[in-house]
Amino acid sequence: MPEYRNLLALYDCRSKQEYIYRTNRVKEITGASLLLTDLFKEFFDKTEEFDICTEWKKQTAPENFLEYFNQSGKDAEIIYEGGGNLCMIYKDEETYIRVNRALSKHVIKKTFSVSIIASAVPVTGDFLEDRKNLYQQNAIRKNTGAYFVPCNVLPFTQVDRLTYQPIVKKREDKQYTSESWAKLKKYENKYGKEKVTMFDEMTDKGNDSILAIIYIDGNNMGKKVKNITEGKHDYSEGINALREFSKKTHADFVENPITAIKEKLDELCQACGNDTEKQRQYQFRQIIAGGDEITIVCSARAVVEILNTYFETLTSVKAEKDEDKNSACAGVALFHSHAPFADVYRIAEACCESGKELSHLEGNEDKNYIDFHFCHAGIMNDMETIRKQQEGDFTARPYEFSESWQKFLEYGRILSQTKRSNVKDLGEAIAKGERFYDENGKIIKAGDSYYREELERIKSRDSRDKKNLCEAIYSNPEDEEKKKMIFDISVIFDLWFSGKEMKHEQT
C-alpha cells in the first residue's frame, strides 16, 4: 500500500445545545442555530487563502480518490457534512494546522464563544480503518479538551445574569453581550428587524396563548452509518456512500417533512377564510433544521396535524432493507407564551429522549415514538422528576405513532362527544386513586374506586344517545392502558379535542 502525507480530519462544535439555548430570547436562539449551521460553510466557501473543494453535494468521488485528490493540487476537500460534523481531507499536516489557525479566528469573530473540536489522523488508504481511528480521536478530544468562554469582567462591569458575560451593547430596552449580539445580528441578517415578537402571529394574548415546541430527532443514525459503510475500505466507495447518506438524511428527515407540513397548514389556513383567529392556529416557526433533527414552534392546536404529517411523510420513504427504514422520536412541550423558552426546550428534548429509550429496545428500532408534556407552571425540575412526582403512575406516554398514538387520538375524538367537565373529572378521579407500592417503591396496584365511580356517573347520563362513546370509553373499566390514555386526554383535551377556544389560564 502506498504511503500518503494526507490527513483525514473531523470538526465538531463543543456544547452546541448549550450555546444555542444559553438565552431565553427566541431571536437569539434562532440566530445561534443559524450561526452554527453556516459556521463552516461561510469559512470554507469564502476563504481565499486556501484552495479547498467544497462542492461535495454535487460531486461523485472518482475512482482512485486519493490519487485524484493528490494530483488535483487542492489544499483540502470536504468529504461530507452531516450530524453537526464536518469531515475533510488535507494534503498534509502543515496545511491542516494553517487552516485551523484561520478557522479559529473566524469562529471567535462570528460566535464569540463557540469552541471547536478538531481531530485528525494520518490517511493509510483504508477508509474504514481511518474513519474508525478518526472518531476514536474525536471522542478523546471531546472528553479531555477544556472549554473556555472568552470573558474579561472587572468589579464594576455590568454582566448578563444568565451567562455572566460583560454587557457590551444596549439597544432600546435590551442589553447584549458580544455573544448575544452576534446571535441577534445573524437572525436579523436573515429575517430582518421585526418589530413584533416571533410568536405574535401564533397567539392571541389573554385568550389563546398556548404554544408548543416540537423537537424531533432521528433514531439509530450511527448504526445506519455503520451499515452503509460496512465493507467499504476503498476511499471512493466510502466517501460516496457517506455523501449520499448525508443528502438523503437531510431530505427525508427535514426538507420533505417540512415542505409537507407547510403545505398542510397552508391548506388548513386557507380553509379558515378571513377568520384571523383560526388562522393563528396554523402558523409555525422553524428554529433548527439540519441532518436528522428539527425544532419548530407552533400553536399548541397545530401539534397533532404537524406530527401526523411529519411521520406520515417520513415513513412513506421506501427502504430496501428493514434496517434502513426511517424512524424518529418527537418530544412536545406545551407552554404559555411567556414561559422561559430555554427551560421549555429542555422539557421537549427530555420528552424526545423518553421515546428514544423505547426505540433502543430490541424490536423497536424502526418504530416512531411521541411524548408530550404540558408545562402548566414554573419549571422547577427536570422532566423525569416532574413526571415521576406528578403523573408517572397515570400516563401512557410515550406513544408509538402507528398504533398507540392512533388509538389515543381515536379515544380523544370519541371523548369529545361528552362534556369537557366530564373529561376533566375523569382525569382528576384517576389522579386521586390510591397507589400501592412494594418495598422498592415500585407500584404493585393502582386503586381505581374514584375512577369507576366517575365512569358510572357519566355513563348514566351519556348512555341514551351516545352508544359508541359508552362502548369505547366506559366499558371494561379495568383496562389500565385505556385509563392512562383517558388521563393523558384530560391533560390536553382543550387544545386537541374540544374544538373550542381555550381561555388564558394564569400559572
Image (spheres, rainbow, N blue to C red):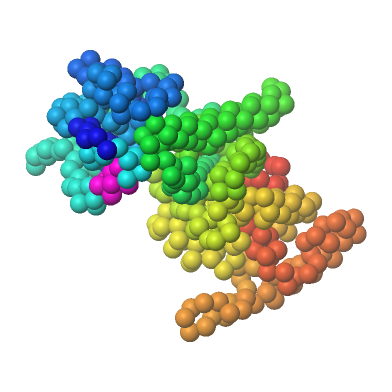
The residue at 58%/33% (across/down) is 257
The image quadrant that residue 37 belongs to is top left
User: How many labels, in total?
Assistant: 0
Q: Give coordinates of residue 34: x percent, y percent.
A: 37, 29
The residue at 42%/41% (across/down) is 232
170 w.r.t. 144: above or below: above
Of 446 and 337, nearer the camera is 446
Q: Is residue 138 magenta?
A: yes
Which residue is at the far right?
464
The answer to whether residue 64 of the structure is visible from this angle is yes
The image quadrant that residue 72 belongs to is top left
Of 270 and 126, nearer the camera is 126
Q: Quadrant of the N terminus?
A: top left
Q: Give coordinates of residue 507: x percent, y percent.
A: 49, 51
The image quadrant that residue 456 belongs to is bottom right
321 w.r.t. 257: above or below: below
The dominant secondary structure in magenta is helix
Which residue is at the far top?
48
Q: Give coordinates of residue 10: x percent, y percent.
A: 29, 37
Span shown in magenta:
130-139
The answer to whether residue 22 of the structure is visible from this angle is no
The residue at 12%/39% (across/down) is 153
Of 430 and 31, nearer the camera is 31
- Left or right: 504 in relation to 453: left
Q: Give coordinates of residue 307: x percent, y percent.
A: 61, 42
The residue at 70%/63% (across/down) is 482
Which residue is at the far front?
1
Q: Is residue 496 magenta?
A: no
- Left or right: 287 in relation to 394: left
